[in-house]
């Protein structure tokens, strides 16, 4: 079977575990302000070694999602105050997240329409109901994952399911950046409008428009994320030095 290891130059497990924990934070398994379980408990829960847990927590802290206190534990932050982006791990995560958005923008319309047609009207109806429930619960920001999960679970093509499963693992990397980029705004309010329009297409039996609306949603997200990264990170010049920092801009390596 086709298998795609996304993280080419680094151990896969710490990245995948960091993504999983962020997803659980998003879904409320670890609410903001609560403490994560102890290291031994997490190692047992996720079936990994203590070193892997520590390295995954280092990634989460660099992303501003958690903060560790000696003798107390690791607390989940309400929103990141800054992101330590100088390290290779975070830089690689940024690049892979942006590449995943680019791949989605190129493929999601066709893949989603193909999957919808393969599953039929009853499944389309249930998908629309799932979107509507999350919108009513004020969780419009989860609609990206709902859409990708639908493809992962329902697409008849095994290779597509494998690739989209890896993309689903990468999506949580965008969450801390979205929190920082939209600081002071509700993520639900930002994403609800475009998602509601897409759901209307699905409810009205217009799967082509529904699929194409997701292409536009992803293209917008990719464009905004790229602009945010460009404006918030110093860019190395050809000689390895950082560009001059503009007045009021963040220190190099942080957002």
Image (spheres, rainbow, N blue to C red):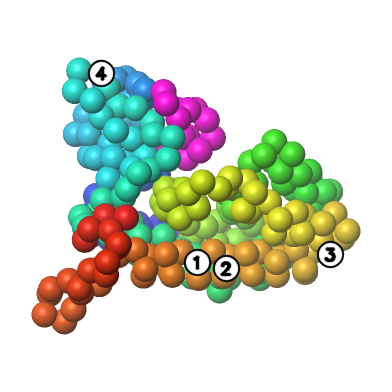
Sequence-wise first label, 4 or 2:
4
Residue 5 lies, in percent from the top left, at 35, 57
**Pair 4/3: label in front:** 4
The answer to whether the residues at label 1 and label 2 have Cβ atoms under 8 Å apart is: yes
Q: Is residue 144 left or right of residue 56?
A: right
Q: How many marks?
A: 4
Quadrant assignment for the N terminus: bottom left
Sequence-wise first label, 4 or 3:
4
Residue drawn where x is 42% and y is 64% of the image: 228
Task: State the extent of the magenta-drawn residues as a range.
Answer: 21-34
Write down the residue under mark 2: 220
C-alpha distance separating marks 1 and 2: 6 Å
* 144 up-or-down from 98: above or below: above
- Residue 29 in the magenta stretch? The answer is yes
Secondary-structure class at tag 3: loop
Residue drawn where x is 50% and y is 38% of the image: 26
Write down the residue under mark 1: 224
Secondary-structure class at tag 4: loop
The front one of 202 and 13 is: 202
Residue 169 lies, in percent from the top left, at 44, 49
Quadrant assignment for the C terminus: bottom left
Furthest residue in direction bottom, as rendered: 238
Write down the residue under mark 3: 206
* 12 up-or-down from 117: above or below: above
């Amino acid at each position: 079977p086709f298998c795609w290891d996304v993280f080419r130059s680094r151990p896969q497990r710490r990245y995948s575990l960091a993504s999983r924990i962020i997803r659980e934070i998003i879904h409320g398994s670890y609410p903001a302000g609560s403490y994560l379980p102890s290291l031994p408990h997490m190692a047992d829960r996720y079936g990994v070694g203590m070193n892997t847990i520590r390295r995954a927590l280092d990634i989460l802290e660099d992303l501003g999602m958690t903060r560790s206190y000696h003798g107390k534990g690791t607390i989940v932050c309400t929103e990141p105050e800054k992101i330590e982006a100088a390290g290779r791990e975070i830089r690689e995560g940024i690049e892979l997240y942006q590449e995943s958005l680019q791949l989605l923008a190129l493929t999601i319309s066709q893949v989603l329409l193909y999957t919808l047609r393969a599953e039929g009207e009853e499944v389309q109806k249930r998908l629309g109901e799932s979107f509507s429930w999350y919108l009513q619960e004020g969780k419009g920001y989860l609609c990206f994952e709902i859409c990708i999960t639908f493809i992962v679970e329902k697409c008849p093509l095994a290779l597509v399911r494998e690739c989209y499963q890896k993309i689903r693992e990468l999506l949580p990397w965008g969450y801390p950046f979205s929190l920082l980029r939209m600081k002071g705004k509700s993520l639900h309010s930002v994403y609800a409008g475009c998602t509601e329009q897409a759901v209307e297409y699905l409810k009205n039996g217009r799967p082509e428009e529904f699929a194409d609306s997701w292409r536009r949603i992803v293209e917008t997200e990719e464009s905004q994320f790229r602009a945010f990264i460009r404006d918030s990170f110093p860019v190395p010049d050809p000689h390895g030095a950082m560009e001059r920092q503009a007045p009021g801009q963040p220190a190099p390596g942080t957002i």
